[in-house]
Amino acid sequence: MTISAQLSADGQELIISVEGRFDFSAHQDFRNAYERVDASPKRYRVDLSNANYLDSSALGMLLLLRDHAGGDNARISLVNCRPDVRKILAISNFEQLFEIA
């Protein structure tokens, strides 16, 4: 499992990439990815193209990111989801809380 974060050149968007299993073992690294940024991005993009597993703790971590980013006003997109990951997000009704692309 690897979590990395990159701020866009204009500082407006934070891209968080998840690789491997997105589960409780990623909790601290995922939080650090958005809490230790020296800017206040307006948008967040979570790239799940290399995430091959997602469990309920990962769903909770995404909700914590949403709270951190402004709750109902948060602009977060979950992108490049594999079919299995997209299915879990759909079953959990996350398309009502996040943009899933």
Image (tube, helix red, strand yellow):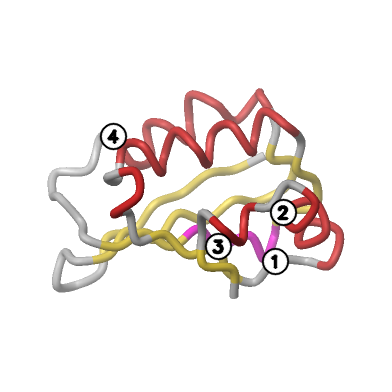
- Mark 4 or mark 2, whichever is nearer to me: 2
* Residue at 68% in and 40% down: 22
Name the residue that disc number 2 marks. Answer: 89
Q: CA distance from mark 4 to mark 2?
A: 23 Å
Q: Quick check: 4 left or right of 41?
A: right
Give the number of callouts: 4
Q: Is tag 1's residue or tag 4's residue first in the polypeptide sequence?
A: 4
- Are circles 1 and 3 on residues that touch, CB within 8 Å? yes
Left or right placement of residue 32 versus residue 77 in this view: left
In three-dimensional space, the C-alpha distance between marks 3 and 2, rounded to whole angstroms, equals: 10 Å
Q: What's the residue type where badge 3 is placed?
A: Leu
| Residue type pointed to by label 4 | Glu
Q: Magenta segment, which residues? A: 46-50
- Disc nearest the viewer among 1 and 2: 2
Q: Which quadrant of the figure has residue 25?
A: top right
Disc 1 residue type?
Cys
Q: Do the numbered discs 4 and 3 sit on residues whose CB atoms are within 8 Å? A: no
Give whichever of discs 1 and 2 has the lower sequence position.
1
As drawn, is 80 to the left or to the right of 33? right
Read off the residue under disc 4: 35
